[in-house]
Amino acid sequence: MPEQIPDTAASHSPDSLTTDTPVMAFAQLQLAAPLARAVAEMGYESMTPIQAQAIPVVMTGKDVMGAAQTGTGKTAAFSLPLLHRLLKHENASTSPARHPVRALVLLPTRELADQVAQQVKLYAKYTQLRSAVVFGGMDMKPQTLELKKGVEVLVATPGRLLDHIEAKNAVLNQVEYVVLDEADRMLDIGFLPDLQRILSYLPKQRTTLLFSATFSPEIKRLASSYLQDPITIEVARSNATASTVEQHFYSVGEDDKRRALHHVIRKHQLKQAFVFVNSKLGCARLARSLEREGLKTTALHGDKSQDERLKALEAFKSGEVDLLVCTDVAARGLDIKDVPAVFNFDVPFNAEDYVHRIGRTGRAGASGLAVSFVGGKNDARLVADIEKLIKTKIELEAIEFEEDSPNISAQGRINDGRRMYQDEARDDSRRAPRSSERGGLRDIAHEGQYARPARDERAPRRDYTRPPAPPKDPFFDQPYEPSVAPEVKPSWEAAPRTGGRSISANIKPKRRVAFLFKATEETSS
């Protein structure tokens, strides 16, 4: 179990807020009546620390950098104040010109964008503010039609938003608010060029909000270039994990990880869990292996189409699937209630991803279980990075397998599933002849597994003797003798033809034809 290390060096700047704010109720906020009604219908009563501190600040129009643990309601922390301030632009006009994009929410993954868009629509249910979501993997035509109608709140991923900007489907010259959710990933190397292009289309006078579970010092310096006098809100120690999540690190060999997974699921009687791996290929292979071993499993990774990814999430949310084997595409922001456990089948390469992974359980104050399987020197180095990030001492635990648990390591590695069954069939086919040679077939016959048929019941043996040769014809046994032809002289030595005109045989004789001649005057006289 990880042991907390006291953080004596923690300090806060004058422009930062900490967790000393008492718990507040949503009724204490001066939200507009339509928003307060929607919040009450959704069952929100008391605010989380990040909501209690961020909502009043955002309602004043200041830039904010918010750091909080995953599952603490960061989406409501920026959505509700933005919608409250945008109500001044609310109108019932059908003209798209009266509904320009006023707020832009950028997110790193498609699933997170779809989830945030659904939350925004629920919050704005009783208002006339329009919202839309655009992300890759889907047809652009329905998205274009929605953008052409006009929207005030646009939720998007960077790549697809750039496609719509270049196609002149989205105009961002009237944006007042920009939200970067999961800001550390948004400002990462892969998203930075796209983010810079998008921000170049926006007005310079705007309010920028950054929310994430983790903020490294480098990310803070990079983000400061996009914010103007930001107020930093940290409701927990930076990069801290949720206190409601019980964390275990088991030292397990690579070949025993699946066996350990079965053991922990049975021990804690888990009904559902996330299983995180580091590669898309390993994700697909592990999902197939667990499915063959009797667990209802589906895979979620970047190589799947958007429709397949949404169907996999919906199946997991509805309880049709027990295990969701996924890559880090599902590590950020996904809010699926009552997921009791998270397995790190592979230790994440990036220590910050560990915080996001285990944040899929223990959400909204509920208890959760996070289990990581550590095997090899490389995993030990990655665990040391996690220990340094979360400032918690991590101790590796040994796992004791039950005797009746299936020995997965004896069946082969993850990618040996098909080979496993071929080897078993091959072994069975080899055992039977050996038993017959040793005279053990009679004993096996009593068990009904194999019995040698009686000699009388056997099929008659095939006769491989050669058939008798057919009688020989003496004519074909005689030696070859060329036939004697009559002597014929060549044509040039033959006797010349007698009588008649000698004409070549190649010249055809002329054909006689009757002619009619006109008589001349001399002839007639």
Image (tube, grey):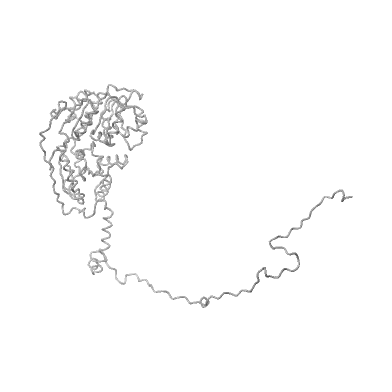
Q: Is residue 234 left or right of residue 164?
A: left
Q: Residue at x 33, y 38 (%)?
A: 137
Q: Is residue 369 above or below residue 444?
A: above
Q: Residue at x 25, y 33 (%)?
A: 187
Hey, which residue is sitting farthest right in the picture? 525
Q: Is residue 242 left or right of residue 110?
A: left
Q: Can see residue 128?
A: no
Snapshot quadrant of residue 28 = top left
Q: Nearer the viewer, residue 458 or 119?
A: 119
Snapshot quadrant of residue 21 = top left
Snapshot quadrant of residue 319 = top left
> What quarter of the picture does the N terminus occupy?
top left
Residue 143 position within the rendered picture, expressed as x and y whole percent measured from the top left: 34, 32
Q: Can see residue 286?
A: yes
Q: Nearer the viewer, residue 142 or 514?
A: 514
Residue 286 position within the rendered picture, expressed as x and y whole percent measured from the top left: 25, 48
Hey, which residue is sitting farthest front in the picture? 493
Q: Is residue 408 above or below residue 229?
A: below
